[in-house]
Image: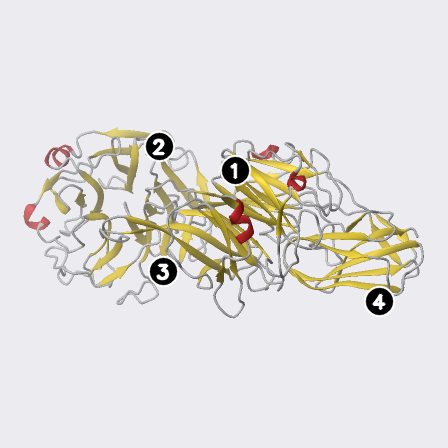
Amino acid sequence: MKRFLIKPLIITGAFCVSTSIALAQDSWRWDSSNRLLNPSQIEVVPPCSPQIYDIDDDLDFDLIIGQGDGTISLYLNNGFPGNPEWTRDTSFFAGFDYDFAAVPTLQDIDDDDSLELVVSFKFDRMPVDSIRAFRNRGTINDPAWQEVFGYFDIYSDLYPSVTDQKFDDWDSDGDLDMLARCWLDTMYLFFRNIGSQGNPDWSFDSTMSAHFRFDVGPCGYEGFEVADLTSDGALDMIMAGIVCDGPDMINIFINQGTNQTPQFPYYSDFILLPGSGFFNTAITGGDIDGDDDFDLISGGSFPLISYYSNNGNPASPLFSGQGDLNMGPFFINWSRDFAFLDRDFDGDFDFISLYTYVMLPSPRYFMAWAAFDNVGTFEQPQFISASWLRDYLLPVLETGLSCGDINGDTWPDVAWGIGEYVTTQINRPDSVFRQDDSIFAEINALGEYQHPELVDLDQDGFLDLVVLDLNTQTLTAFENTGTATDPSWALGPQLISGLNLSASYANACDMDGNGLPDFILKVGNTLGAYLNIGVVGQPTFAHAPQVLSDLQGLQASYFDVADLDGDGDYDIIVNNDGAFTFVENQSVVGIYSEESRPVFVSTIINYPNPFNAETRISFSLVRTGHAEVTVFDITGKLVADLYNRRANAGIHSVSWNGSSNAGQSVSSGVYFCRLKIDGKDGTLGKMILLR
């Protein structure tokens, strides 16, 4: 829960003037649990192999995950059918830690009323698996696993390269037979149980194995599941086949025969494209949403698990093509730099990213744009793919993104760097963005630059630019000496005085809520904060290690800052290998509005103050809104309207020369500048005019 500081009010005439309060050095708090971008709180290490089983016997499915690092995780379901709530249990599978890619199967395979755990795993990331079995001699709350020897000796001797095994009573004799996948021979092996209760004995059955031949592409099979999808009593097959020139496909084969003599079509009856990865796709399922049909879950080479709800009926299954829900972090495969912007002016943040795109079968790598509209809420953002950025195929080069109104039309544009130059994507509200190379042509003529960041450093109302100079490997600032609609650029080293110029790139925001632009820099693979200790128009920065002291050790390949949860302060969003983490700002910052929600602005300030000829009034927004800046005298009479338009998130400024709306010079005295956002009073600033 965030804490918001209620700023004391000074009553002067008809006004309540809020005074600026700096954050105490020990008041910075951050939470990296990723609640917004991983609401399931499920952690996945790819390639993963999920299984569902009602471990705690509470009539819902719990989730077991064989992790890519060889460990096994358990998430107990404390919710309801169709609305699971996951809680991690760290003790149930404690001690299971193999070399790579554990594939667990939990089941009472010997019919003795105790659970067995069958684990196949790889050594040294090679495609040769080993299989081991364990029996729980303890309880659900206090498991005691003992290895069971001899179960799979013939199995391992005949086919050492096996992974994935499913236990079902195919021959209807009251015990569990075993179907396994052979990795090297791209085939399925059937082992008939010829043992007795409590003493299974599996014998390879070549005749039965011959029934399990499928066309799933020339590159082999992946994970599989067995279930009666059509409620006809015959077990069907769900499996993942590797497609050599694209992502895996989940193939569904309906059994037209019986369990004793199965008859599967050579070609699949249904195909799904899993959202969980390209390779090592694992399949599991059950009636997860409580509607009496079979739903699917898949895992793979991405750090997430995809859930597919069966929207058909028990006799005719129907699955959505890309999955209804992903459990794990928000993820974009091979994503690089990214940025948040309110593209459609609906008050929340949309999302863009550049990502690497591979064209197979002979690998050729390109970069492309990914755009996402936010159709969720501040409490739970939900990003869906959008098409308002043209999907170019670009060469794979170092990239950088920043957003702001570059051409003065109030709509957020994109500054981006690719390779050795910076350019723009101009926002056209009724169409896709349009690339414009002319805006930064002056800068590109001077050298080679990367990682652009748009920010009004001198607070003159026009966006300046901070870039990485590729020749000197230092941060460089360019001052916009033109206008908002016709920018012109000049080197401005004075604008970044005090920054660590050896940083690889920078993101600007008003971290401490004082109306001045601050920076978070990436140095190496870690982040550092620099607060602005200067005045309006004259920035000076100082390293502030206390700001990010909670985040020691946080790694960030790419990052951005945005008020993603809409609570009035800046959060940090980190991208590592395409997996996104929301680092929530829980610091003491902000003020309460009359609705007990934070006002989404920082304190409005002006400089110089007192002033004679002119003063510059600066304010910042953490998200897009309609901003109004007005000046009143000590009696509450309106003197001047200075600013009245929609403004993007960021720092803004406007000048006042001591004149009224009628163009007349006003007398010396005390005046107040008032900021309103979306028609609601934000805060007031006190100004002293000396003639």
Report the disc number at residue 138.
2
Residue in front for this viewpoint, 492 or 306: 492
C-alpha span from label 3 to label 2 = 34 Å
Instruction: State the image coordinates of residue 613 (x, y, percent, origin top left).
Output: 86, 53
Seen from the viewer's position, the closer of residues 306 and 387 is: 387
Mark 1 vs mark 3, CA separation in Å: 44 Å
Q: Nearer the viewer, mark 1 or mark 3?
A: 1
Q: Secondary structure at mark 2?
A: loop
**Disc 3 or disc 2, which is closer to the eye?**
3
Residue type at numbered disc 1: Ser
What amino acid type is highlighted by mark number 2? Gly
Q: Amino acid at mark 4?
A: Asn
Q: Secondary structure at mark 1?
A: loop
Q: How is the image coloured?
A: secondary structure
First along the sequence among labels 4 and 2: 2
Residue of label 1: 504
User: Sequence-wise, which precedes: disc 3 or disc 4?
Assistant: 3
* Numbered circles on residues, count: 4
Q: Residue furthest front?
A: 445
Please tell me which of labels 3 and 2 falls first in the chain: 2
Q: Residues within 10 Å of mark 1 (few under 14, many from 20)?
A: many
Residue at numbered disc 4: 661
Give the structural element (helix, strand or loop) at label 3. loop
Report the Cα–Cα distance between label 1 and label 4: 46 Å
Between disc 1 and disc 3, whose residue precedes? 3
The quadrant holding residue 583 is top right
Instruction: Say whether residue 490 is left or right of residue 235.
Output: right
Q: Amino acid at mark 3?
A: Ser
Q: Which residue is drawn at the image coordinates 57% and 39% (left, top)? A: 475
Q: Which residue position holds label 3?
A: 309
Percent across and percent down for residue 191 are 13, 43
